Amino acid sequence: MLEIRFTQKAIIDVEVFIRNYEESFLQLYSDSGIWSESVIKDMYIKSANELHEKIIDGIVEKLHKKKVLGRKETGLMIEIDFYIGSRLIIVLFSDNHRNSIRQVESIFIDRKPIIF
């Protein structure tokens, strides 16, 4: 098994996505007048934390094995895409076989529109 490392850019990619996810719902339910507004906001904060864990765990699960199915060579980087629930995750990574390290370089997470 390979050690999975995340670059600062990859970490920021996930953090920005999660922050935007959380903020969109917090703004939606801010000053709404709904009696359970704080409960709803807490639910979305919890949901954002769970989504963060699912994304990181899903990436590690896909990349920790020596062979990664569905990988596409893109120059010096390797790309893999997969779904977590119905959300598309695209990961660019590089391999250092000598040191048994696989480094996640960049992460793109499909944003779903909020539909009312």
Image: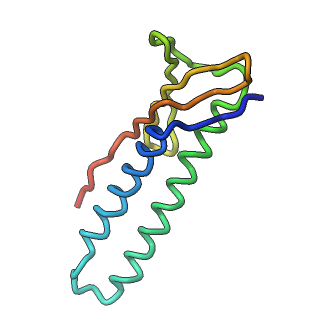
Q: In this view, does 54 lie above or below 8?
A: below
Residue 35 in the image: state x and y as whole percent: 31, 90
Q: Quadrant of the C terminus?
A: bottom left
Residue 2 in the image: state x and y as whole percent: 73, 29
Relative to 87, 94 lies left or right: right
Q: Which of the 4 image quadrants contains residue 33?
A: bottom left
At x 56%, y 50%, the residue is 54
Q: Which of the 4 image quadrants contains residue 57?
A: top right
Type of colouring:
rainbow
Query: 14 or 25: nearer the eye?
Result: 14
Relative to 9, 104 lies left or right: right
Q: Is residue 33 above or below residue 18?
A: below
Residue 8 in the image: state x and y as whole percent: 48, 40
Query: 30 or 5: nearer the eye?
Result: 5
At x 25%, y 77%, the residue is 30
At x 53%, y 25%, the residue is 93
At x 45%, y 9%, the residue is 75
The number of callouts visible is 0
Residue 84 in the image: state x and y as whole percent: 52, 42
Relative to 113, 21 lies left or right: right
Q: In which quarter of the image is the N terminus?
A: top right
Instruction: Tell which residue pokes out farthest to the right in this image.
Output: 1
Query: 62 or 10: nearer the eye?
Result: 10
Q: Which of the 4 image quadrants contains residue 99?
A: top right
Instruction: Tell which residue pokes out farthest to the bottom in this image.
Output: 35
